[in-house]
Amino acid sequence: MIWHPLFLTTLIVQTSGFLFLVTAALTAFRIVVGWKSASADREQLTLEIKAESAVLQTRWALGLYLFSNILLIIGTTNVYPDLIPGAMCGTGVMQAMNKAGSGFLILNGILLTILLYWNNLEILNRKQTDVPLTVLSARLILLALPVAVLAFGRTLLAAIGVDVHQPVDCCAVVYDQFRTIGEAHQISGLPDRFWLSAWVILSLLMTWAAVQLRRRHHDPLLKWNAFLSVVSVLWVPVAAVTLVNILSAYHYGVLQHQCPWCLFLLQHGAVGFLLFGCLAVVVIEGPAAFLLPAAGRKTPLVFATALDRGQAAAGRVLTALAVFVMLSALPPLLWRIRFGVWIGG
């Protein structure tokens, strides 16, 4: 079990967020079952008051979960490795957590994505006095609740499963995945060249889609919104694979050290926080450019605001892409200029 004060703080913060979310979900269930926007009876007015409280509770939950996830990442990358013999980065921490460690960050990421989308939807909902998206917002809260249960349980199991007296060998995990030099130059059976080409092509397509969306203010068919959403979802895994398996070598200065966690270490400039933060922005804002206008399509005032929000999402995607490209592509270029060859020869 990890007894570090940082992890105990993380658990307390996450528990507080979970309690806020449970309280909000109780009201959300009543909204889904009995919301009558055209009614003015006592029951509906009481439910509207409770709905206001549920919005505040869910926003508190979002803030607390966001804070707890930041603490989790900081702890896993730069604090908890010191507690585990043989661990030098987050890979060693994941190894010490065994099977439970593989999913807790993913579940927490899914939960944050749902709550962030809910928050954007609720902002749109408040643009009209009859709050037409209230039921949809309530359903998202109900969707977030089971994910929160799984995320909290997985996080707790991962921490309990750590034996701080059992040594690990995180470098062996990284290097033992290759049996031959040929395997080291392939990812899922495809050569490095394929992944680099796919990343460049998808980056250009995403830039084109975002620029087109920024230019076309009112597009009721949402063609560019949908295109940006699809390209963003495709770009994120390709960019992550290319970064970890190919481009990270220029940050480490050695070949085949395909470890995403070492990018978060201070000795490598903690560049992983920015790089993976950019990936997170794209995976949230890209789909939001389409999903938010689609959700408010039947309400003119909400739809107009959602189109503006879609344009803002396109701008954020462009910014995240620019930062990611600069941080991931600049080290290879500097290496080439300095040594006259690529790191692989």
Image (spheres, rainbow, N blue to C red):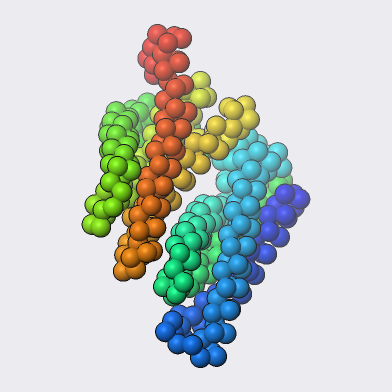
Q: For this rendering, which residue is in front, 340 or 289? A: 289
* Residue 265 showing in the rendered view: yes
Residue at point 38%, 64% (across, down): 302
- Give the answer, above or below, for where 34 lies relative to 2: below
Q: Across the whole image, how many numbered discs are drawn on residues? A: 0
Q: Quadrant of residue 46?
A: bottom right
Residue at point 29%, 34% (across, down): 204
Residue at point 72%, 54% (across, down): 9
Q: Residue 175: image x %, image y %? A: 48, 32
- Give the answer, above or below, for where 331 lies relative to 146: above
Q: For this rendering, which residue is in front, 58 or 234? A: 58
Residue at point 26%, 53% (across, down): 219
Q: Residue 295: image x %, image y %? A: 35, 65
Say left or right for 258 vs 92.
Answer: left
Q: Residue 51: image x %, image y %? A: 55, 76
Q: Quadrant of residue 78?
A: top right
- Give the answer, above or below, for where 175 lies relative to 291: above
* Residue 287 showing in the rendered view: no
Q: Split into 4 quadrants, where in the image is the C terminus?
A: top left
Q: Split into 4 quadrants, where in the image is the N terminus?
A: bottom right
Q: Residue 201: image x %, image y %? A: 27, 34
Q: For this rendering, which residue is in front, 59 or 143? A: 59
